[in-house]
Image (cartoon, rainbow, N blue to C red):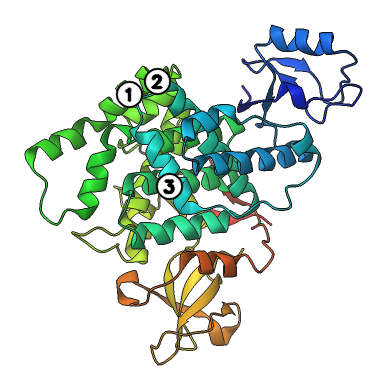
Amino acid sequence: MNSVRLAPVDLHSIKLDVPLPFSLVDSRGILLAHKGFIFQTEKILEGLANRGSGFFVNFADRSDPQLRITERAYASQLQKSLRSQNPLGDLLKVQVSYANSLIEDADQKPLDWLDLIEGCNAMLHTRDINFFNRRLDSIASILSHQLSTNPDEALLALFYLSERNGRLYSATHGLLVCVICVLTATHVLRWSESDVDLLMRCALTMNIGMVDLQDDLTLQAGPLDMSQKFLIGEHTNLSVHILDMFGVEDKDWLTIVRLHHKTVQEPLQSAHVTDRLIGLINRADVFSAKCSSRRSREALHPALAMKSIYIDAQAKADPMGAAIIKTVGIYRPGSFVKLASGEVGLVIRRDANTTTPAVMVVLNRDGIAVVALSIRDTSDRKYAVISNVPSSMVKVTLNLERILELSRQKEYVAIPGWSLASVHGPANAQIEPTQ
């Protein structure tokens, strides 16, 4: 079944005697009027809208460039509503506009990642069913747009904030796991739209039962007490209970959230979609947590974090973990590396070759913070990456907004797709780049 991601359409923005720029569906995703259809009278327009409880557009169809333009304009409106003083009221008012679908939003501002984290945090804390559903849909739309245009920015921002920002850990972690899963499923594993959509919703809501505890533990120096251990053990069941309260009836969604800590052996060999999605979320969850810093411990060395998901319990290469590493790169965005030049830099973009990312210099060869930031091409041997550098060893304060601005200066080039060499092969199947 095709994925369905609906957004309401402003009825009053639809023009008579003008071909529709996108298909219209009802509240269940059933087609009401195909792309190019012309409404000739208000009566026909309003009658069809009443039959479908309004008009909606399905953004799951990624093949239509006009629909992608429409989604960008819609995502921009949602982003603005996340910053409003009355977020629930504004989110309920956001609709797809016919006029906005006809042109690119030239004034669209770059995504404010701290705002998105705040919005995700509000979603995880609410107990209002309408707010939860609207906020989840808005975050999914914003992320989908970002990952289709510049996924490196998402990885850079969320990995960097996971290591350097102690606030709102649960929301940041959920967003990072979501981004890793969606990119891996889309570009490496080549999963269906419906699987990717389900992955996104599961990753964003898997820890809704322990949001406050996750945030507190990030700042806690001492050991867990008995009540904390109990809540950690029960948080998956509590998360499912909350989602059930919110009207989630998708059994796969609830199963994946309940079992996302389960280690599924050889999930790629399973015929069950839940096993495959649990396997990916579980490994992305572990990897993201190990890449994050807490008061009680520093972020794990990048090489050790990769090893934790690359080697399975039988000391064999784990294809699912390897797929994640291929996605984020040997030197992932947001991590620090040392160059052959003696400089230390921050990885800001991946490359088709995972060992040659784009790196922004932050320390010169004498270990002194640089004033003028510059990007090194590490495919040049004199600037080749020679090792990872733990974040804790780089004693500089960086401006994330400035970093992201610099990372956007070079036109984004999509990374060629990767595929598993034998998805149904042995557990130690290696991942190779497609030719």
Residue assigned mark 3: 117
Please provide percent x and percent y for residue 4.
61, 25
Camera-side residue: 227 or 197? 227
Q: Name the side, left or right, on which 401 lies relative to 105.
A: left
The outermost residue toward the left is 226
**Secondary-structure class at tag 3:** helix
- Return the mark for residue 242: 1
Q: Name the side, left or right, on which 250 lies relative to 15.
A: left
Pointers 3 and 1 in contact (CB under 8 A)?
Answer: no
Please provide percent x and percent y for residue 120.
42, 40
Mark 3 or mark 1, which has the lower sequence index? 3
The answer to whether 152 is drawn above or below residue 57 in the figure is below
Please identify, in this view, whether the residue under mark 3 or under mark 1 is nearer the observer: 3
Q: Amino acid at mark 2?
A: Phe
Q: Residues within 10 Å of mark 3 (few under 14, many from 20)?
A: many
Residue assigned mark 2: 246
Residue at image position (78%, 35%) is 99
Residue at image position (57%, 77%) is 375
Q: Which quarter of the figure is the N terminus placed in?
A: top right
Pointers 1 and 2 in contact (CB under 8 A)?
Answer: yes
**Secondary-structure class at tag 1:** helix
The outermost residue toward the bottom is 366
Residue at image position (34%, 70%) is 391
Asked whether the viewer can see residue 406, the reply is: yes
The answer to whether 420 is drawn above or below residue 352 in the figure is above
Camera-side residue: 40 or 207? 40
Q: Quadrant of residue 7?
A: top right
